[in-house]
Amino acid sequence: MEDLRRPFLAYLDTMKVITVLLPYSYNNGEADRFSIKSKDIMLSHLEIKEIIPLPNNKKYICETSEAVSFDQSYVIEDGNGSQTDLQIGAVIRTREFDDLFYYSGNDLGISFSKEKTRFKLWAPTAAVVKVKLYLPAGTSAGTYSCTRQERGIWSAEVPGNLEGIHYIYEICVNKKWVEAVDPYAVSVSLNGKRGVVVDLAKTNIEWPKIPPLHSPTDAIIYEAHIRDFSIHPESGITRKGKYVGFVEEGTVSSDGSSTGIDYLQELGITHVELQPVNDFEGVNETDPLKEYNWGYNPLHFNAPEGSYSTNPKNPYSRIQELKNLIASLQQKNIRVIIDVVYNHVYERETSHFEKIVPGYYFRHDQFGIPSNGTGVGNDFASERRMARKYILDSVKYWLSEYHVNGFRFDLMGILDIDTMNEVRQIADTFDRTCVILGEGWDLNTPLPQEKKSILKNAHKLPRIAHFNDWFRDTIKGSTFNLFDRGFILGSTQKMDAVKQVVTGSISLEPQVPGLFQQPFQTINYIESHDNHTLWDKLSLCSPDEGDGVRESRHRLGTSIVLLSQGIPFLHSGQEFFRTKENIENSYNSPDQINWLDWKRKSLYNSNVAYVKGLIKIRKEHAAFRFNDAELIKRHIRLIFQDEHTAAFLLEGVGQFGPWKNIAVTFYNGEHEKDIVLDTGLTGQWKLLCDGTRAGLESMNCSEALSFKMAPLSANVWVQEENPSSS
């Protein structure tokens, strides 16, 4: 199908509105009438409703009485007899289009059997669709025409056993031919150039049973990158940078210290959050160590990334190895959250979504310009029914096929509330303990404020957790102002905020609003893959401080994360003072910047032991992880506060664990301090954490909670006996 010569342009912008653009170079941009024709038959005249002069042409807004059908082609003719083809325009972003072409079926992509394979693609604006097949070596294996069906579906059924065959769609839209990979492809060829027909039954494994997770606040999340985790020379891992390397057992560094999956189990975390494992741009799978990327350049959302596979040419390897990674972690009672980037694609213009249904899957502003709230040139239009369906289908696929235990939504604020709540509902059908968390940042995308999945709307997302930037900035200082100092850097201005964030960022008192309604909505963190590591921020903020003071500040910050109400989140290596050599955005920096330096784990083993101890304390008693705001209000009491200290009492909590009362202090002063905590309770208190040591064994005893606080320290005291009031 060849392109027509176009003296002017015409677009279908709604089901009844046709916009005609006449350049001034053609008849001075003048026209007195237009008509719509199909197969050389004049169907009706258009009614010109408005004429708008533009710099290079005149814009004619016209109405048609003709019911335009998307399964045939039309031309627009002016009064001089000149013609142009009617192109699909902004109509694809109308509700009418969405309703007309919404497809509810669950069979998009391929349906494989040894006898035949069915291909199904949603492409309502296409005039022709073909599926082209290739042998793995690249030789053509035939081209098959697809048949248009209801709701914009194109389908082809190809006989025979196509297992291992590569495929790609050839699509004609607006007289232009493009090639596009199936968005529903579950495996792809090298570097994601084509989809691959696979028999998923061959990748089935026996999934382990894991103990129940009673509440989201029982989670302790540990963020890790597949490649970073094993690539360091001291990791002791053989297959570095690979899915299989992540779960090698029995690995140790040169000093015999545990590394890898064994270390994770020893640390005591409950969830590993994997940075993107779906197929992404930025690393050449033929030479994966030549380039580095975090993975936030999504190409194919349902196919695993090939650079982490031991054999990226084999379409089964990436599937099987990722499944085994997830199952191996679960076997050790560690759940798996995957980082998903549904908010954007690597590049809108070349994306398969844009090729298949141009203009539909991405958000545009009032002038028709693609929006850029993500900062990468495109925002995924989750509010459109088939765009939303794609996200929901993908989430369902990862839950059913890979048995993941949660999703971390990158730039969740780009997505709409209805989509995110439906994600929650789908997750519940598989496992109500599935953790859904995301970045609820308010970004400049043309979605009404009340529909954005942002922190401000957390009350509309009742069972979805948000990264809590109030917690982060209160404890360490602003991420975006490097030299802003939070509590652990000595700030005396944020004590009221400290009180709020360590108690779940809920409303403790009627007159003081909280950020969240429930503690399981807050992800408490001070460091993640984004921005400077905490160690680097401390180094840059206070370059003249010695390492000992810096370690104490860092340790205090991690203590607050693990002892606060809500869901704690640790960046991998945070427990041994991870550094990226002061690089703020290391998304494509070399391995030497991004790797998890296992030598530091040995060097700072005492701090690792301290973090392990804090995790044991948190897991031992449910009072550190209340799942209901009313329980926090009922049992938590501020017992001391000055410009450098906050002390809290968890009172009458014996029904939730082995200790009847718990006292926690956070102190950011730089000198030792005597303190007396007036709890109003009698009986012996035992010290479980003194700021450098932590665990379940008592380090000291006190009758009156009169003690010395070390500089920059956290303290945890507990009462095992049921005391009487004084």
Image (tube, rainbow, N blue to C red):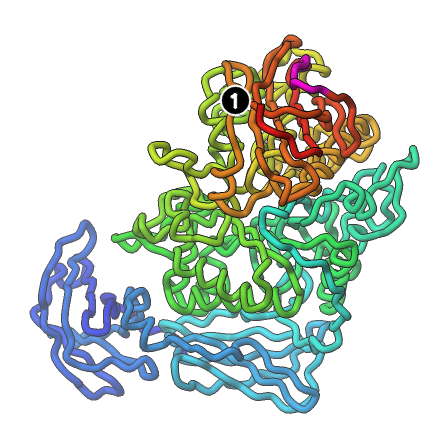
**Going by the picture, which residue comes out furthest to the left?**
32
Q: Point out the image quarter for the C terminus.
A: top right
Quadrant location of residue 681?
Answer: top right
Left or right relative to 10: residue 624: right
Residue 278 appears at what percent x and percent y?
Answer: 62, 58
Residue 520 in percent (x, y) is at 52, 47
- Residue 379 position (above or below residue 499): below
Indicate the quadrant containing the N terminus: top left, top right, bottom left or bottom right: bottom left
Residue 78 can be seen, yes or no: yes
Residue 143 locus on image (x, y percent): 57, 83
**Residue drawn where x is 75% and y is 61% of the image:** 327
In terms of depth relative to the viewer, which is nearer, 600 or 120? 600
Left or right of 479 in this view: 304: right
Write down the region rendered in magenta: 702-709
Amino acid at dot 1: Gly
* Residue 98 among magenta residues: no
Q: Residues within 10 Å of mark 1 (few under 14, many from 20)?
A: many
The picture quadrant where one finds residue 264 is: top right
Q: How many marks?
A: 1
Q: Secondary structure at mark 1?
A: loop
Task: Say which quarter of the image contains residue 168.
Answer: bottom right
Residue located beneath label 1 in the image = 486
Q: Nearer the viewer, residue 515 or 690?
A: 690
Residue 639 place in picture, x, y as percent = 53, 23
Q: Main secondary structure of the magenta part?
A: strand
Q: Is residue 181 visible?
A: no
Kindly identify the residue that appears in the image at 42 percent across and 69 percent down: 386
